[in-house]
Amino acid sequence: MKFPFLVLSFLLCTTGLSAQDYHFSQFFAAPLTLNPALIGAFPGSYRVAISQRSQWGQTLETPFSTTAFAADFKYYVNPKKRRYKDAFGVGVSFASDRVAEFNYSVNQIMVGGAFHKALDPKSNQSLSLGFQLGIVQRNVSYDQLTFEDAFDGTSVFVDGASAEELPENNYAFGDYQLGLNYAYAPKNKAAVFIGAAIHHFNQPEQSFFAEITRGQSVEVTQTLYRRYSGYVNLRLPAGRSLDISPRVYAYMQGPHLATNAGTNLRFLVNESNGSAFHLGAYVRGVGNESGYGVDSAVGMFGVEVNSFLIGMSYDAGLNGLQTSRRHQGAFEINIAYLGKENNDEAVPCPKF
């Protein structure tokens, strides 16, 4: 029980450090967690997506897991009366981080919208602006923990014997984010997607101890840093059935920096129904005040079948934090369904 208690102590009691957000290796497969401007940015009328990521499976008794669910819808602005087919999207997303060792979880629900301005009559270019607002809840179960002063000196921890003063095990706060995205994507030609977002714009307080220590000589606070992120993705046709998509995604949160760089290959299998499969490889680097280094390598495989998208990836840890690198991996799966319209003028967005 020692390791989980140390983790919990870090989560509850850190005063000078703000925690980092969850992330997905297939970042374009979870667009509502990537950039609010991507709400409604897809070829169709609606999209439903779910993401699941598991990591630390060999360090903790049960893996650290992240789950996200999102649904968004796209509507055109007077499509029959306007030369430029502008659109707007609305969406809702739910995400949960959970450490089952002591039922520690961070849950958030966000609602948002985005406006997609077409910059030419064929909708080859678009500029999108989006926002999200919602509530984040942090929760922990104290009954899963034991403390040193409850040890009876033999082999038993006595329930209720600890004198530890713990705060309420549930804390919630409001949160919101803004995003901008530009896309130039003519059909069957080279394309570029550029976006940037600011998450936790209000820099909310997230400490369990904030309320009970307010006004005291020592106030315990844990402000959530703003997260600044940006990405560039290219789509380069290499023949009739192959697209090459080099990409870079980076984000900074307080003293922490992470960069993702790699390439995704899309192989078209059946042009009539758009069936295709994807292969991708990435390298992630991380940095803080102590320096910058390579954290992990990521391999990805994805399939498109009609309106379904399924992607799987594995992160192989390269940071040397554990004695065995096979214990550093993270497995991720993403599934999405796009409800399509005939002759849809899509607001473009990469798929994985």
Image (cartoon, rainbow, N blue to C red):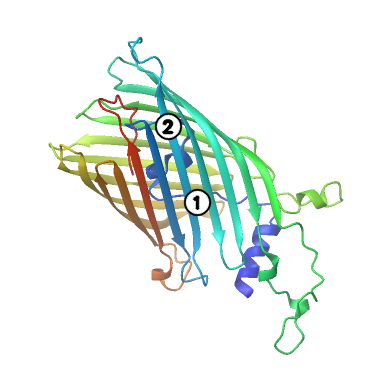
Labels 1, 2: front one: 2
Read off the residue under disc 2: 73
Residue at 39%, 14% in the rendered image: 78
Q: Position of residue 341 (x, y in %)?
A: 30, 29
- Of the 4 image quadrants, the one containing the C terminus is top left
> Dot 1: what SS?
strand
Q: Amino acid at mark 2?
A: Phe
- Compared across the picture, whether 149 is left or right of 275 comes to right
Neighbour tally class for label 1: few under 14, some 14-19, many 20 plus, Cα within 10 Å: some
Neighbour tally class for label 2: few under 14, some 14-19, many 20 plus, Cα within 10 Å: many
Residue at 60%, 72% in the rendered image: 3
Q: CA distance from mark 1 to mark 2?
A: 37 Å
> For residue 150, what is the image quadrant?
bottom right
Closer to the N terminus: mark 1 or mark 2?
A: 2
Q: Position of residue 196 (x, y in %)?
A: 46, 33
Q: Is residue 206 visible?
A: no
Relative to 308, residue 176 above or below: above
Q: Position of residue 251 (x, y in %)?
A: 48, 42
User: In the image, which disc is placed on residue 147?
Assistant: none
Q: Is residue 171 visible?
A: yes
Q: Position of residue 88 (x, y in %)?
A: 44, 24
Residue at 62%, 45% in the rendered image: 136
Read off the residue under disc 1: 287
Residue at 32%, 22% in the rendered image: 125
